[in-house]
Image (spheres, rainbow, N blue to C red):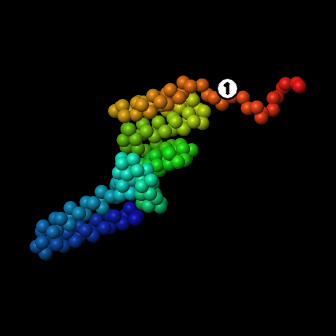
Amino acid sequence: MNKYIKFLIAGLMIAAGVYLMMNRQIGWGIVMVFFAASPILLFFKNEYILMSFWQMRKQNFEKAAQWLTYIKNYKSQLHSSQYGYYHYLQGLTQAQENPTKVEPLMKKALEYGLNMKHDRAMATLNLAAAALQKGRKQEAQKLLEEAKKLDSAGMMTDQIKMIRDQLKMPSMQKHMHNPNMRQRGKIK
């Protein structure tokens, strides 16, 4: 549903509430005006994102991804403050199946902005893991330090420690020898 239709619905509900109050049904009019607050709330906090967060809290990633599929065009359906969370949730739901798609989604989420500090910490932690996976250790170290600063509650200390331990391990790509490669420079 387009985000501006919610304002239209809220306006119609308020008009109906005022009409009821004018016809001496004050109780029903007040109830109708209170119900008009729900479409206004859903303008700023999209219902599909709320349902996706609820499913993520229950560790049900498939249903969370399914709720996100209902958002066809995020720029017309979401308020601009929700763009970052849309990409953030997309990245979290795809982290298990497609880890290569997580990095651009988390970058977009941080670019659009995330309100909560722990969400920004989780996004930067995912970026650090992606950088480490691609062999960019310096970038991963910087992102890991930034994630540690953002994690003021200490909720991600185990994940940060795990990635830090992986940073200390030597890169196997440099030390492995591929027997199928030509040996350049050696005279046989």
Q: Residues within 10 Å of mark 1 (few under 14, many from 20)?
A: few
Where is residue 182? Give x, y as percent.
81, 32
Q: Residue at x 20, y 66 (%)?
A: 32
Q: In this orientation, which residue lies closer to the viewer: 184 or 60?
A: 60
Q: Residue at x 47, y 61 (%)?
A: 72
Classify residue 27 as left or right of residue 93. Answer: left
Q: Amino acid at mark 1?
A: His
Q: How many marks?
A: 1
* Residue that sits furthest to the left in the current view: 24
* Residue that sits furthest to the front in the current view: 179
Q: Residue at x 46, y 59 (%)?
A: 69
Q: Is residue 173 above or below residue 66?
A: above
Classify residue 147 as left or right of residue 19. Answer: right
Q: From the image, which quarter does the N terminus lie in?
A: bottom left
Q: Is residue 71 visible?
A: no
Label 1: which residue?
175
Where is residue 88? Give x, y as percent.
45, 47
Q: In this orientation, which residue lies closer to the viewer: 122 or 111?
A: 122
Classify residue 5 as left or right of residue 108. Answer: left
Classify residue 47 as left or right of residue 88. Answer: left
Q: Is residue 23 above or below residue 43?
A: below
Q: Is residue 99 above or below residue 73?
A: above
Among the 4 quarters of the image, the one containing residue 181: top right
Q: In this orientation, which residue lies closer to the viewer: 12 or 63?
A: 63
* Residue that sits furthest to the bottom in the current view: 23
Dot 1 falls on a residue whose secondary structure is helix
Q: Is residue 183 above or below residue 53?
A: above
